[in-house]
Amino acid sequence: WKLLHAAMMLLSLILAVVGLCAVFGVHNAHKTANLYSLHSWTGIFTVALFALQWVLGFAGFLLPCSPVALRKLLKPVHVWLGGSILLLSV
């Protein structure tokens, strides 16, 4: 389940980055300012948090060298941050 979760989250992250690239491309083509609203800054912040969450989740839960104590410490933070990122993305 961990591998499936990591793979689906990685796919979601890749699609989010592709979406951001498309938005920046359209804005640049129409000579519209980038990051001019709270909505755009919230989106960038959410994708950045999502990327950080994925990297820390990968390092903490999928690498075999990560200690069990780190996993126990990281799990509640990982769950809470995941829910927060979900709320930000909605």
Image: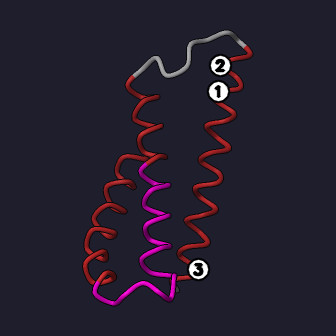
Residue at the farthest front position: 65
User: Is 2 left, or right, of 37 in this rendering?
Assistant: right
Image position, residue 7 (x, y; %): 61, 72
Mark sitting on residue 70 = none
Is residue 25 or residue 86 the one in the foreground? 25
Residue name at image x 61 percent, y 37 percent: 20
Image position, residue 9 (x, y; %): 55, 65
Residue name at image x 38 percent, y 54 percent: 85
Which amino acid type is marked by label 3?
Answer: Leu
Which amino acid type is marked by label 2?
Answer: His
Residue 90 showing in the rendered view: no
Residue name at image x 33 percent, y 90 percent: 68
Image position, residue 70 (x, y; %): 31, 81
Q: Do the residues labelled 3 and 1 touch (CB within 8 Å)?
A: no
Between the C-alphas of marks 3 and 2, the distance is 35 Å
Residue at the farthest right position: 29
Give the residue number, with chain letter if any, for mark 2. 27
Q: Do the residues labelled 2 and 1 touch (CB within 8 Å)?
A: yes
Q: SS class of the residue under badge 1?
A: helix
Between the C-alphas of marks 3 and 1, the distance is 30 Å
**Is 67 rendered above or below residue 31?**
below
Which amino acid type is marked by label 1?
Answer: Phe
**Is 6 rendered above or below residue 32?**
below
Residue name at image x 36 percent, y 87 percent: 67
Residue 69's quadrant in the figure?
bottom left
Residue 29 showing in the rendered view: yes
Q: SS class of the residue under badge 3?
A: helix
Looking at the image, tell me whether mark 3 or mark 1 is earlier in sequence order: 3
User: What segment carries the magenta color?
Assistant: 49-69
Give the residue number, with chain letter if any, for mark 1. 24
Q: Is residue 60 magenta?
A: yes
Give the residue number, with chain letter if any, for mark 3. 4
